[in-house]
Amino acid sequence: MKFGLLLYPGVEPIDLATVGVLSMASRVVPQIEYTTVAANAGAVPMSNGLRVMADLSFADAPDLDVVIVPGGPGWVRACEDKAMLDYLSHTAKRVRIVSVCTGAMILAAAGLLDGKSATTKVEIVPPEDPPLDILTSRYGDVETRHALIVDEGRIVTGGGVTLCIDTILYVIEREFGKHQANEVARIMEYRAAREANAARLPTFVGA
């Protein structure tokens, strides 16, 4: 199974932890592969100026099974990027889409969350507005939930920041089994954190 991390200017670097989880997971589940995708192959600036290489352009990434949409302050511009929204709308017809943190805002802008439940980042630094509240106010067709994960079948949305780790572990469990996900969490030394997050926030499974 091949995962693609979607990159765009202004991604929060902590959301690159999704690739870190997949890297560790490939030791337990060898069939896991991963790559990076952007509008154009090459360097993409993150929110702090770090530049990360996109392996593939939108046009060159037809063989993915899962596309991961990360968050970060760049989501505001990404929501107005027609090429990105078109890519997601088209891609969602044939692959699974997973958002982490404010990546859910981009899915909503692409119309992928209409009639569905979703979650996104909640905790902020005042006077910022919680992204979950923004999602609620901007997209009336989305049922927002303060949750760890919302699983709507082909679309999964995860909570904010480091909950990206829990979200990818959830996807691994869904695709490969609970034992494999637990083993990945163990070798990451993340079992206690995962259990604590699951105890404080719900997971909703819809379609």
Image (spheres, helix red, strand yellow):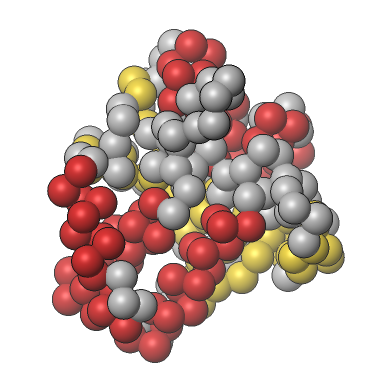
Residue at screen point 62% across, 43% down: 72
Q: Is residue 83 placed above or below 76 in the rendered structure?
A: below
Residue drawn at the location 21% of the way across and 55% of the way down: 196
- Check the picture and name the quadrant holding the N terminus: bottom left
Res 10 visible = yes
Residue 53, percent from left and from top: 76, 68
Q: Quadrant of the C terminus?
A: top left
Q: Where is residue 121 in the image (x, y as percent from the top left)?
A: 45, 36
Left or right of residue 178: residue 3: right
Q: Which residue is drawn at 44% across and 71% down?
A: 21
Q: Considering only vertical position in the picture, is 66 above or below 204?
A: below
Q: Is residue 176 visible?
A: no
Q: Nearer the viewer, residue 174 or 184?
A: 184
Left-right relation of 159 to 170: right
Observer-nearest of 19 and 188? 188
Is residue 185 shown left or right of residue 12?
left
Q: Position of residue 80 (x, y in %)?
A: 73, 27
Q: In this view, does 46 lie above or below 136?
A: below
Q: Nearer the viewer, residue 12 or 206?
A: 12
